[in-house]
Amino acid sequence: MSLLRDIQDLASSSSKDIELSTLLRKCKILATRLNHPGFKSWVENELNGYNDVSSLPSYRVLKVISKGHFSTWGNSILTNIQIHTHVMKEKHEKYVKKAHIMQGIGSLENLLSKEGSIFQSPWDSKLLAIYASDFYNDMICIKAWQVISSSDIAGIIDTVKTKILDFALEIEAENPNAGDIEMNSNPIDQNKITQIFNTTINGNVQNVATGSSDVNQNSQINNTAKEELFSNLLDIISNQKVSLEEEQYQNILKVINEMRSTQGTSDFSSKYIKFIELINSHAGIFSAIAPYIPVLTKLSGVA
């Protein structure tokens, strides 16, 4: 059987025993024999994963919802609550309404092999720091993530299989022996392969920046209140010391003191974000500092 027919049979098969990663490795052979850099690059990215979100194909950009864990003012924890992102500024909301699936096909197939699995993509801690207290009254979001269902992942895999099938059929129509000749012998004119590649595979590419907030806000908080704020934060962390490893404890104390020394400067925002990252996985600490988040956000100038 020719390589092109082998690829077509695998791509059109409904058998769950055929892995897409195996099919892609056959496409890697075809890409080398066709000597087409665009097809080669696409196959490599699908096999090994994408490194650059700006080059991510549109079928790997999914519309998703977000969920989170919340702390109430009474220090209760509510889990897996849907987050209504409409309260966010548009320039921030776009980062959480769409998920960018960068992993290679093998990783996605492995995810699907786990029955009932749901893929979670955590929010950037910068966004959590800005909006933690804005989603619900008297509740602070202590952890947030995008929810990506198994059907979303299956859709990506099915799309890749269909694109491979369409490409192989079009290549065969041009030259049925194109997959079985010597490497780099150019069995089809490169311009024609590019035309087929663009029609069947390339599609639209999402150009999405991954930067953070670019807004700035001046906050008027008196010096006495600021000093009391940081003293209270230090007291809270000291009271929570038993739940922390010594290195974690010292790192958190250090960043609180760095926030205190950099308040009113452009460096404060990065220290605050680091603080949120350090305590993000400690629900008890996050709950205890929840009343101070709005003030810290104002001081950071990132709201």
Image: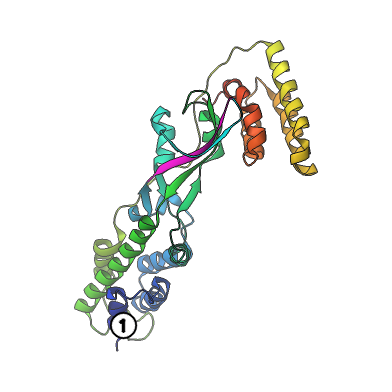
User: Which amino acid type is shown beneath numbered disc 1?
Assistant: Asp
Label 1: how many Cα within 10 Å (few below 14, some 14–19, many 20+): some
Start-end of magenta stretch: 64-73
Q: Residue at x 45, y 54 (%)?
A: 118
Q: Is residue 267 visible?
A: no
**Magenta span includes 110:** no
- Image position, residue 279 (x, y; %): 66, 37
> With respect to residue 67, does 107 lie above or below?
below
Q: Quadrant of the N terminus?
A: bottom left
Residue 66 sits inside the magenta stretch: yes
Question: Quadrant of residue 23 in the image?
Answer: bottom left
Q: From the image, give the main secondary structure of the stretch colored magenta.
A: strand
Asked whether, in this view, residue 138 is left or right of residue 285, the answer is left
For residue 283, above or below residue 298: below
Q: Residue 93 falls in which quadrant of the image? A: top left
> How far across and how far down the image is residue 97, in percent?
39, 41
Looking at the rendered structure, the secondary structure element under dot 1 is helix
Where does the image place residue 238, in percent across and percent down from the top left?
78, 31
Which residue appears at 29% of the width and 86% of the height? Answer: 2
Q: Which residue is mark 1?
A: 6
Q: Looking at the image, which is closer to me, 93 or 47?
A: 93
Q: Nearer the viewer, residue 163 or 71?
A: 71
Res 70 visible? yes
Give the quarter of the image for residue 7: bottom left
Q: Nearer the viewer, residue 226 or 283?
A: 283
Q: Nearer the viewer, residue 125 or 33?
A: 125
